Amino acid sequence: MIEAKRLHSVELSLIRQILQCAPSDAINLALGELQFPLPNLLRQKSLEILQKGTPRYTPNAGIPELREAIANLYPNTKPENVCVCNGVEEAIFVSLLSILNPGDKIAIPDPEYTAYSAIANILGAKVIRLPYESDLLSINWESWEKILAQNVKMLIFSHPSNPCGHIFTKEEAERLITICNLNKITMVVDEVYSRLVFKNYMPEYFREAESIFLLDGLSKSHCMSGWRIGWVISPPELSASVIKAKQYVSTCSNWLSQKLAVYALSAEGMKAVDEVLAQLNECRFLVVDKFQNLADKVLIPDATCYMMLKVDGNDLIIAQELANKGVVTVPGQAFGEVSKGWLRINYAVPIDKLEPALDTIINELYLH
């Protein structure tokens, strides 16, 4: 017996492959998870909710009070256009499933989050990459415009971007929206890192696009990764399709998680975001300090929980060697061709683990 053909081109992610090389007590700077404790106000609220209710099935698209709370985050959005999902990963899947046909072209930046291309391949779509420049942040707009004019049906990207933390300027966003509107391209914008921003605020330029899916969740902002709450704001004409896809993928999201999410999005629950960001800032200060003498080797963006580290040699081999030394990172080639020769490091780790891990990286790569 062999697997279905749709899975032939999909590999276990390089992140998971590197994890298999590491000892059981390795410090994990690879997975996209903030490794801080659940904020206490959320912990206490979850216990209170569980004591008062019994977890049961919920509507496919989520409980009404959560759909309303999410809709209130987006101007002119109705609750019926919201679908609650089991994390943003499922939100990505049901969004693409609702509109892509086999053979359709989907454009994905390079580098970019690995699941986008994997899910597109499973669905039989044709993936076209939009390369950033070698600094991982700049865009050759003539190149992007030319690629996007080639009968592309969908463009998907994270904003801020994973792995590089790129945030579009107002002018860049307006240009990209114009290109997509002109070519009748549906945009899928994954905003799960939008609350992990250290300077100014996160702009909301892309909400002016003619056809757009907006994705977000609570895994990063509230340290609720294990609660698996994400959502899709879909174009009105596709909302029923997204909910139908959600029904047959996982029926519904967890009752307790949804109840807690309603509180998390309240004025009181949003205090958890400040707590998480304060911890992340402390880690970021440590990263900046540790790599101050290696400024030409690092990219520490103003958003997300990641830094990028330029290495000499094959990034996959170097990541495997670091894993053997007890520090797990992600080779840049996991995210595309442009980021080969880089490592992605998640620094959202308690200081007592982060500092020795960073010391190991610096000693192994630069002080030999």
Image (cartoon, rainbow, N blue to C red):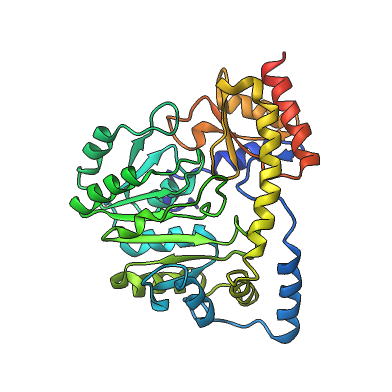
Res. 224 in view = no
Question: Residue 204 occupies which quadrant of the picture?
Answer: bottom left
Outermost residue, top side: 368
Q: Nearer the viewer, residue 248 or 345?
A: 345
Question: Residue 327 occupies which quadrant of the picture?
Answer: top right
Please give left or right for residue 349 compared with residue 96 in the image.
Answer: right
Q: Nearer the viewer, residue 59 or 36?
A: 36
Res. 341 in view = yes
Outermost residue, front side: 200
Coordinates of residue 352 in the picture (x, y in percent): 81, 40
Please give left or right for residue 231 compared with residue 356 in the image.
Answer: left
Coordinates of residue 136 in the picture (x, y in percent): 45, 32
Residue at 56%, 45% in the rendered image:
304
Q: Nearer the viewer, residue 177 or 326?
A: 177
Coordinates of residue 82 in the picture (x, y in percent): 43, 72
Q: How many labels does the image show?
A: 0
Please give left or right for residue 31 compared with residue 181 in the image.
Answer: right
Q: Which of 324 and 203 is in front in this view?
A: 203
Residue at 66%, 64% in the rendered image:
271
Please give left or right for residue 19 compared with residue 302 in the image.
Answer: right
Vertical comparison of 291 with 169: above or below: above
Where the C terminus falls, by quadrant?
top right
Coordinates of residue 120 in the picture (x, y in percent): 38, 51
Question: Residue 364 occupies which quadrant of the picture?
Answer: top right
Vertical comparison of 253 with 156: above or below: below
Vertical comparison of 173 with 336: above or below: below
